[in-house]
Every structure is written in structure tokens, then in C-alpha cells.
Image (cartoon, rainbow, N blue to C red):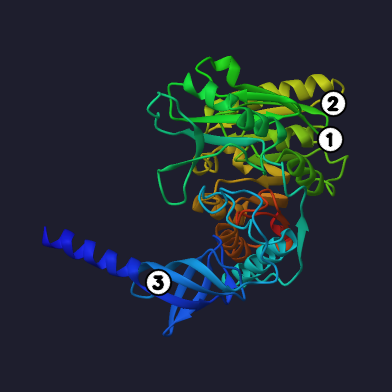
Amino acid sequence: MYSFFRLFCSSVLCYSFRMRIFAEKMVAGGKCIGRQNGKTVFVRGMLPGETAEAVCTVQKKDFDEGEAVEILDPSPHRVEPLCPCAASCGGCDLMAADYAFQLTLKQDILRDLLRRFKCGYHGPVEVLSGSPWEYRSRFQFHKTPADKNGKQAVGFCARSSCKVTPVRDCPVAVPGIRQLLRTGELARQADGLPKDRFHVFSYGGKTAVESAVPEKNRFTLRLSGKPVSFDIRSFFQSNVPLLEKTAETAFADLPPDDAGNFLDLYAGCGVFSVLVHGRSAFRNLFLVEENPVSVSASKVNLRAAAESSPRRKVSPHFFCMRDSSWVKTPAAQETFSAAVLDPPRSGAGRATIQWLAGAKIGRLLYLSCDAPTFARDTAMLSAGGWKLDRLLLCDFYPQTSRMETLGFFSRTEPGRT
């Protein structure tokens, strides 16, 4: 009881502690670094160069965390957020910055991470971007508790909370989802769903809302002219136009007459294998993915790719297993002309990084959805005989601090391949 009381009191003291802070720079995750009596403070809700009144939310031995409550000296890049829920829903944490400055911030964060992890990369951070609004096709919505009339709204969980913020519009959502929100149709459909959390995907004039009927969760779209199907409950990139642009950039230098092997690691539903199938002469495609639902979808997608190019003899090989298991298989001893890695936020597994040090791969492409783990893995790849030649910031999520990166790697010791 005493321990709980002491914890409660320290929490109250922490939350009542206010400070004036100057934001020196932004770091991964969207917080800015400031100093208070010589101690580092990570503050959310600020832009670099601003001075604000902030409240302390977390006190630790080496650093504090806080939330800005009043901007005293605003940045010239600060703008009025287009969405009234920007400060509460927890999603678009950079909407208060103009879009050009958002890209600059992300480039600076990425350079700083590469420097801290001693990656040895001194080239430019190129930017690949698209529309900053109405770009997002995939959402996970939550239902609010029912009101006194038994009705429920839909929305997003507030930052660091399970409390649902109701939303009636979302300016980063594609028009199909915005229409469902504005008319209240999504809330009406959600009323009949047994779960409080559900997925929605919309693109090209079609919209699918998660259903208890499996067939209704299947979505098909065209990527660079190729049909791709997937289950909306499984992962799929939310920004479809930028996915096409990223794949086009990634594979632009692949020789069209290369008849070797291609490795698609963390393959998902096989998007990259489908797109490679249409532009290169690879004889064998090796797809490694642990999610059986995604593996099933990849088989459908590669079958459709083969039917659309009947003269091209390509053999897909599917491995439904974790990357740490695949690296121990005989297939991992093959020679690959090229490989693409698209791991989850946790990055490539340690066993995979170790395997890459001795793997027979000509060129390596690494698409990352988490900048810190990309920098960490790049440092380990550099120690294992790889060199980062080119780096792209792929802005899949404008208005947010989330970053995706595309790294082009080559061997520092060509003889090892």
C-alpha cells in the first residue's frame, strides 16, 4: 500500500512539474530534444527551434519526457493542422509542420541515426514522395463504447492510450474511406461487427470492411498493371501509389536478361516477386514468409503473374517459415543475383544478418519501416561485408513521424559472391 501511495505521489509531482524548454532537434519517434538544468528532455508536440511551456510526464534517472502545452516562440514552419483530431488521435504527429519541413526533419533524423550507428554512409538521403493528403488505403479502426442509445462511433486509439478518439473524417485517408466516415456508413457497418477493432482497405473505387465471411476480406488491386490479391487483415502497404514508385525505383537497375535467382525475404503476399516477375528474366523466385495467410495469397499472385506472361518460364519456391529457420535450409545456400528484404519494425533477425555476411548474393535491397532498426542493421551489414551505396527516404506516411527507407547495398568484397 505504501509503495502504491509513493508511486502515486511521485506521478502527481511529475505531472505538475512545468518547464520552459527550447527544442534543439527532432529524433526518431517525433519528439524533440531539449535541456532542463543540464538534463535531457524529450518533448512531444514541438518543432526544432521552438520554445514552449511543457509539462513533465515521465522522470527517469538520465532523462525526462514531456508534452508541450503552449508554444511560446513558434517555428516559421508551423502550420494549423488540417484535422481537428490531430492532437488527440495519436496518428498524425507532424501535421503541425509544413510538408517540405516534414521531409527535411526526416532526412536529418535518418542522417543522425546513420552517424550514431557508425554506418559509414556519407552520401545523400534522396526523397521519394507522393501526395501528402488522401494517400492512405489501409486502416485499423476501433469502436467506441456504446452511448445511452446503444450506438457506437468509430475512431483511433489516442496516443499511449486505449481510449478511442471518435473521428468523422480523416484527411490522409483515400476518398473511399473519407466518404464512409463522413456519411456515418462506417459506424453503421461497425455496429454489426463482433470485434471492437477491425480493418478497412480502399483503393481504386473499391472498399472492403473486415467481415466474418472470409471471402469478403479478400481484396484485389493492380500494381504496375499486375493483379495482386491479399487479405485485408494481413499487412499490406497503406500508400499504394508510393509502393509502385518505390518498387519501380528499386528494380530500375536490375538487368532484364538476368536469368539467375531472386530472393524475396519477408515476402508478405509476394508483391516484390510479382513485380520482378514482370521486368526481369529470373528463373527462380524464392519467397520466405512466416504468415500462412500471406503465403497462400502469394501463391495466388504468382500464379496470376505466370498466366499474364505465359512465355516466361519462372519457378516460384515458397517457404512458410521464420527467417531464422530458412537460413538453415539447403535453399539458403543457393546463389542469388539479387535479394530484397522487407522486415517488420523489429528489423532483420540476428540470424539473418549473420547469414547475409556469407550469403552468395549479388545485390541487396533493404526496405525498412523503422529508421533506428535500419541504422542498426546497416551497421551490422557493413561489418559483414556489405556497403550502403544509396539511400532513399520513402515517405509512405506524410503528416506522421513514421519513416520508411530503401537502402541499396553491394559487396565490399566482390569475391565472396
Cα distance in 3D space between marks 1 and 3:
55 Å
Front position in the image: 400 or 150 = 150
Task: Identify which residue is drawn at 77% across, 54% down.
Answer: 128
Give the quarter of the image for residue 308: top right
Q: Which residue is mark 2?
A: 312
**CB-based contact (under 8 Å), mark 2 and mark 1:** yes
Give the quarter of the image for residue 386: bottom right
Cα distance in 3D space between marks 2 and 1:
8 Å
Compared to 180, does 86 lie above or below?
Answer: below
Task: Identify which residue is drawn at 53% across, 22% down.
Answer: 188
Give the quarter of the image for residue 354: bottom right
Question: Do we see residue 198 in this rendering?
Answer: yes
Q: Which residue is mark 3?
A: 64
Count the numbered circles shown: 3
Image-based side of 295 in relation to 191, left or right: right
Front position in the image: 400 or 121 = 400
Front position in the image: 161 or 234 = 161
Q: Secondary structure at mark 3?
A: strand
Q: Which residue is mark 1?
A: 281
Image-based side of 206 in relation to 23, left or right: right
Give the residue type at disc 1. Answer: Ala
Q: Residue 136: x and y, percent?
A: 67, 40
Give the residue type at disc 2. Answer: Arg
Bin the neighbour count of mark 1 within 10 Å (Cα to Cα): few under 14, some 14-19, many 20 and up: many
Cα distance in 3D space between marks 3 and 2:
59 Å
Q: Secondary structure at mark 2?
A: loop
Identify the mark nearer the N-term, 2 or 1: 1
Q: Can you tell which of label 1 and label 3 is closer to the viewer?
A: 3
Q: Residue furthest bottom?
A: 38
**CB-based contact (under 8 Å), mark 1 and mark 3:** no
Give the residue type at disc 3. Answer: Asp
